[in-house]
Image (tube, helix red, strand yellow):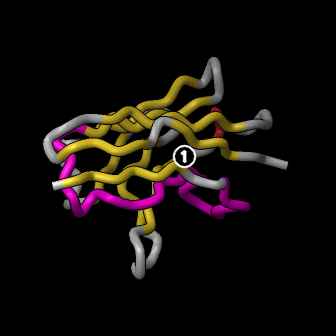
Amino acid sequence: QVQFVESGGGLVQAGGSLRLSCAVSGSTFSANSIGWYRQAPGKQRERVASVGTRGYTNYAESVKGRFTISRDNAVNTVYLQMNSLKPEDTAVYYCNWVSGTTSWGQGTLVTVSS
């Protein structure tokens, strides 16, 4: 069974940066497109970035130009570099497949203070 383990969250001031990591167990990592999702208090979970099997990336408009997703197939890990953080980026961040999301990990909390 695939497991997603997110890390790297924390408290940061507006304008700051964080780098999130997500380690994925199992042997199917390189064959799947994977994304970062977030869920803010009282809001639905949304996908903010994704990276395909060949490295093609896609971003939500709200994070475009500020966030960068990358993957390292050698260590089954996906990253999210977040720059110029805003208070509205405060959320629990998760990673999961783009197609056919499976069991969610615990996520990592990002809190951006104004």
Quarter-wise, where is residue 84 in the image?
Answer: top left
Residue at the (33%, 35%) spot, across then down: 18
Residue under label 1: 33
Looking at the image, residue 46 lies above or below residue 64: below
Looking at the image, residue 95 lies above or below residue 76: below
> Left or right of 49: which side holds 62?
left
Q: Position of residue 80 (x, y in %)?
A: 40, 38
Quarter-wise, where is residue 9 in the image?
Answer: top left
The number of discs equals 1
Q: Please state which amino acid type lies under the numbered disc 1.
A: Ser
Q: Which of these two is toward me, 76 or 104? A: 104
Residue at the (54%, 56%) spot, across then down: 98
Q: Which of these two is toward me, 109 or 59? A: 109
Q: Residues within 10 Å of mark 1 (few under 14, many from 20)?
A: some
Q: Position of residue 83 (x, y in %)?
A: 22, 37
* Region in magenta: 83-105
> Left or right of 57: which side holds 32?
right
Q: Which of these two is toward me, 102 or 42? A: 42
The secondary element bearing badge 1 is classed as loop
Q: Position of residue 38 (x, y in %)?
A: 43, 61
Q: Position of residue 110 (x, y in %)?
A: 39, 50
Does the magenta run of residues contain 58?
no
